[in-house]
Amino acid sequence: MDKKARKSASGGVSRRDFIKGVGGGALGTAVLAPLRGQAIATKKGRVPVYERKTVTMTVNGKETTLSVEANETLLDALRDRLDLTGAKKVCDRGECGGCTVLLDGAPVYACMTLAVRADGKSVGTVEGLAEGGKLHPVQEAFVEEDGYQCGFCTPGFVVTTSAFLERNPAPSLDEIKQALSGNLCRCGNYAKIYGAVASAAKKMKGA
Amino acid sequence: MNSKDYMAEARGDAAKRADKTPQQAKAPAAKPQTPPAAPKAPDKAPDYRLIGRPTRRVDGREIVTGRARFTQDVKLRGMLVGKVLRSPYAAAEVAAVDLAPALALPGVKAALKLAEGKVRYAGQQVAAVAAVDERTAEKALGLVKVDYRPLPYVVDPDRARDAAAPQVRDGRPNVERINEYARGDVEKGLAEADVVVEGTYRTGIEIHHPTEPHGSVVAWEGEHVVAYDSTQNIHGVRDGLARALKVPAANVTVVKDYMGGGFGSKLGLNEQTVVAANLARMSGRPVKVMNTRQENAVCVGYRPSSRQTYKVGARKDGTLVAFQLTNLACGGLGPGDDVAEPVVDVYRCENVKVFEETVFTNTGASRAMRAPGHTQGAFGLEGVMDELAAALDMDPLELRRRNYTTKNLGGTGLPYSSKGLDRCYEAGAKAIGWERRNRRPGEGAADGPRRRGLGVATSIWFGAGVPGTLADIVLYPDGSVEVVCGTQDIGTGTRTHMAVVAAETLGLEPKDITVKLGNSDYPWAPLSGGSLTTPSVAPAVRDAALKALRRLEALAAARLKVEAADVAMGERKFASKSDPAKSVAFADVYRDLRRESVFHGERGGMPDGYAYNTFGAHFAEVEVDVETGAVRVLRYVAAQDSGQVINRLTAESQVVGGVTQGLSAGLFEERVMDDATGNPVNANLRDYKIATSLDVPEITPVFVDVVDPVINNLGTKGLGEPARVPASAAVANAVYNAIGVHVREIPMTPPRVLEALRRKESGS
């Protein structure tokens, strides 16, 4: 079965709805109950069906063990279970970047990542960027250039920028715009954020 | 809050000089007995140490580290999560609501019926539940049984005007008049005109979509209610919630530390705040209700649409002789915006006639959105001005300058307390390189399918601030200083400007000042909207700080054994003016305060006889692909007259944000309703398009620094809305200059640009 066919075979339920629905609403009752305690075949072999799972992840450098629901997003786990509320719930469906965190160093939308996917991995949130009370150069630059207004999208922008500058330490303006295009700022402060990113790049090179 | 109430707030005490109440609309505006001359603004801004210069936000560290506490982040002991069930029908009779199955679910602690009788839009609240967590609450919502009897509905404004259309409000027509205004004789003016230009300009429905959805956490502490609310108006929510719960206002406290955007959609008491309070009362536990993104797209307002038809007459030399405007607005279950203010005020013209109606539909009610009525009005007025300039073969900027006025009501009313629009035109034109525009629309050199053009647009808005705003300065014997005001920082940098004004006045640095705001128990300040926060709060802080300074000077005088008038503040010390060798350090003077001392400040009144407004001129350069219809903004200059700037850094952000929102509304944003279901088809952030970093060029803010001589003790005016007003219009006019035909409808999506080009080719 090719990818496309498999998608349509899910009967109009998006993958996202499916993963959130399993164990949660009506779909969970319908699909999960008969399978509970069994194993189902997947591309990677047979995997057990579970409702909850204990996961261990390194969050901002600290090893953390949590019991999460199978369909729980990383965003909900961070916000509700670990009180790490820096990542924000803006759209809860991967449209805005307000919940961006680092998963093994790479930026991901925490609302589109299941908590179980973080098992055995490192998770970096905006709360972990400053070290020993000293702001990360990206954070410093956002303050200096006023790269924010209401501040709700800022944690997402700061995390995205920190990962981007690791990959591209001397970006052009076009590259900056491209890198930030997955993060929405409704106050519309992009033109100030460009300056903050450029200034952060200079700081990090000097560091 | 709807736009009408909002505009009353925005105008502040303007009721006295109201220029278009229905009574006055028929008779010409009363002229003052002896019109005062416009006061002379100082040529140069005062030389402050901090005010007017860039200051980093005092709370920047909280924001960038994720520690800033937004309503969404509030978590109280024992807190429940509330969720609201909403009608899927645009109109229905709710015959029965059965909460019992939901209440039977383990973990559900309270449930509430919210709809009685008819629901009138898809998304209207029907029931609510509170449960131990979000998942349980969501599950419980699915168990509430509602017996809906669907009714005919109408969501299309044109269809709603048909006599046969379903009546949206029982016993009331779907179309209502919202504004009528006349001065002079428009027919006579048009008859005398050498050139008459007509055009119909449309603006779509734009949704606020603040990143933080509307939400509230409410806790009862005995008889006292504490609401953590995502609001632009803590005092207003306090009063509204007290009424809704039937408790004394004195028993309600509303707290807002940080808020993720509002743009006018968070000005009043929201339904979910009342829901949270009632669920909390029923369950005896704190309850949090946060809207989802989808809920925020349907039930907390939007900017109403408009369809404006202008007829303008001018003499050959560009002198305007007549303006006629008819408008049909649509704000769903609420009235649409009156868009006439720009045409009534901005240009010198003796003959003006306005007629505006609104049409009601089965969609949620609109709310005030950043410069309600003015963004729409500016798009229409500035568009027709550019088409008139082309008909006169005149530079659009020259046409605007030729009809410049220093009095409101198009030169027939009161003098403005200050008006720096002429300086905005000059500075903006220079910064963008206005001489590079195509001399006639569409006459520029082609680069393959790409055409470039430049456009200008003008703004007028209020922004005087509200007399009676209060702020306290508290001095402590240990030398610490606090500034307290019951305002709210909605992201504009209010905390920082309060610190700047206090520090400037008291010889300190902003970081030395502890700022307290966002609590309705603090001294009264108005809602944060109408561009009135800074011109309300900064003068009150200044007043309090000056009083504190007088006290410190008196203490210093006692120490120095000189007259208080002989004391001057220096580098963290007070010294005798006559004998500078005599001085005493701040710390010693503060120590003489035996206890903390509070100094009450108030924003004073404004003299009658003037019109108080803010102005701006925006310049855009665009590139249009005539094969795809895609528009790209290449450069943007926004020149603003908002009086004395308090903090240049955050002021720049306000301008950049206003321009970006205007660009976004001009090119991308539009709610689309599905006539077949009565629901929106783009109730999310993917299909409802908001500008991203890929769409926004570098933006150059210019402040002309005209310090208002009478408006308040700092000469400062508001900025938030002025920066938004003309942005879609400037982009549209640049597109016109590029392709030689005005698109006349926002958002200017590629199909609409191509349609306009076809219109041009067919010569219609």
Image (tube, rainbow, N blue to C red):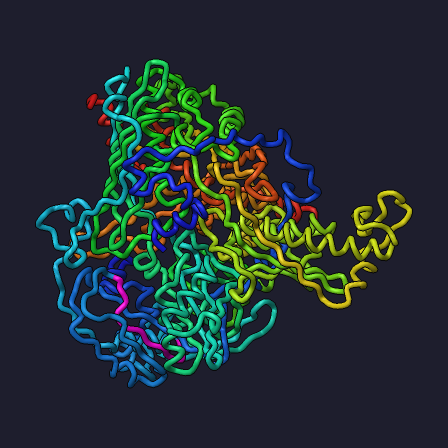
Residue B61: horizontal and vertical position, in percent?
Answer: 62, 58
Q: Where is B554 relative to B81, above or below?
A: above
Q: Is residue B232 left or right of residue B475?
A: left
| Most distant residue in the left direction | B164
Instruction: Using the rendered image of the protein, determine whether residue A14 is visible from the camera's viewpoint.
Output: yes
Quadrant in which the N terminus of chain B appears? bottom left
The residue drawn where x is 43% and y is 35% is B459
Q: Residue furthest front?
A: B33
Image: B624 above or below B143? above
Q: Is residue B534 above or below residue A81?
A: above
Q: Residue A7 sits in which quadrant?
A: bottom left
Q: Residue at x 22, y 71 (%)?
A: B116
Residue at 27%, 30% (x, y): give it: B324
Rendering coords of residue B511 (x, y %): 69, 55
Residue B545 magenta: no
Quadrant hosting residue B315: top left
Residue at far right of view? B581
Q: Position of residue B146 (x, y in %)?
A: 20, 74
Q: Is residue B157 left or right of residue A193?
A: left
Most prominent secondary structure in the magenta stretch? Answer: strand
Image spot of residue B163 (x, y percent): 9, 47
Residue A140 visible somewhere in the drawing: no
Q: Quadrant of the C terminus of chain B?
A: top left
Please state which of residues A85 and B616 is positioned toward the viewer in this rendering. Answer: B616
Q: Nearer the viewer, residue A98 or B2?
A: B2
Q: Which residues are magenta?
A: B123-133
